[in-house]
Amino acid sequence: MKFWRKLAIRALWTLPVIWGVVTLTFIAVHVLSPNPVNLLIPLTAPQSERIKEAAALGLNQPVIEQYFRFLGNLVHGNLGFSYVTGNPVATDLSSRLPATLELAIYAVVTGVVGGVITGVLSAVKRDGWLDLTVRGVTLGGLALPQFWVGLVLLWLLFVKFHILPGPIGRLPVGVTPPRAITHLYTLDALLQGKWELFWMSVRQLILPVFTLGFNVFAPISRVTRSAMIEVLDQEYIRTSVAMGHGKRIIWFKYALKNALLPVITMVGNSIGFAFSGAVLIEGIFAWPGIGQYALNAIQQSDFPAVQGFVLYVSILYVLTYFIIDVVYLRVDPRLRA
């Protein structure tokens, strides 16, 4: 009962946080941003036409009324209409979400699994050649901008050696996507037995997944190494060694379990970063996901689209950290005491 009570309290605390994010987003878009009428109607147009457009957008009302109307629309899932596409922003975001999910899932799994394994091995082989190699690679992953890594990979593997396809989206030009089941091309192609289509979609994923996964891998590997080094110096680890337990059991069962808390936090950050669309990476690889949608909206001053993207990312991070709190309560018995 105590666990569920603490969980309910944390869930309630997410509500004012989400409300604060929504309010700040409204202020940033409706108060601090340029007048959207100037984007839709030329400055040389008659004033009556400009007033009519402002009324159509609801901008002729007091700000407080606009705010409450915005909250009401938000409750019903209405994020407004994009100035560029003319579609509801919610529809645009939902249509692009599967592409971001497919990229993010593979990148997060690759980065987390690789980061945890190399972090553990780096800690147990401290100051050896493996440790020095992992530390050098992860330092590069933290220091190098993600867009630079993506551009270098494109130049080497696409332009120079023609090993992998270029930045043309989820499938080669002219190829028909598989029938939508999960909306993830690789999984849908597998479910339908279309092996050639599956391989095409995998090849398109390799470069963006590696670029995004590298940015997930580097911090997780370093945090895992630091936490493991601290845990490996504890008395109970020495006792386990003296009792003759196997190295892998000690590393991955006893030590890693108690080094997980900072790793979980870093995994949560990585999930929020990856599932928010990784704007620059999707832009570089022409990946038709939420990140590229946001990048186009920023370039074209499409404020409803930008607002919808910001709300999506903000709520995603709030929910991610709520899930992290839940995992903390399950992993660390001291928090349940």
Image: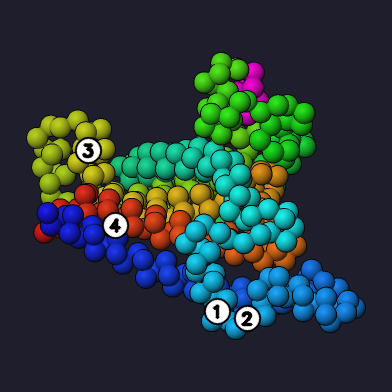
- The mark closer to the camera, 1 or 3, is 1
Between 320 and 20, the one lying in front of the other is 20
Above or below — where is 268 with respect to 155? below
Mark number for residue 61? 2
Q: Secondary structure at mark 4?
A: helix
Q: Secondary structure at mark 3?
A: helix
Mark number for residue 325? 4
Tag 4: residue type? Answer: Asp
The picture places residue 281, in percent across and down from the top left corner, at: 63, 49
Mark number for residue 65? 1
* 324 sits left or right of 94 in the view: left
Q: Residues within 10 Å of mark 1 (few under 14, many from 20)?
A: few
Residue drawn at the location 14% of the way across and 44% of the way down = 238
Decide whether residue 88 is among the magenta residues.
Answer: no
| Mark toward the start of the polypeptide (1 vs 4) | 1
The picture places residue 30, in percent across and down from the top left corner, at: 62, 76
CA–CA distance in space, label 1 to label 2? 6 Å
- The mark closer to the camera, 1 or 4, is 1
| Mark toward the start of the polypeptide (3 vs 4) | 3
Q: Secondary structure at mark 2?
A: loop
The picture places residue 173, in percent across and down from the top left corner, at: 76, 31
| Mark toward the start of the polypeptide (4 vs 2) | 2
Quarter-wise, where is residue 59 in the image? Answer: bottom right
Q: Secondary structure at mark 1?
A: helix
Residue to which mark 3 is pinned: 253
- The mark closer to the camera, 3 or 4, is 4
Residue drawn at the location 61% of the way across and 45% of the way down = 96
Task: Look at the image and tell me in which quarter the C terminus lies.
Answer: bottom left
CA–CA distance in space, label 1 to label 4? 36 Å
- Which segment is the magenta one? 196-203
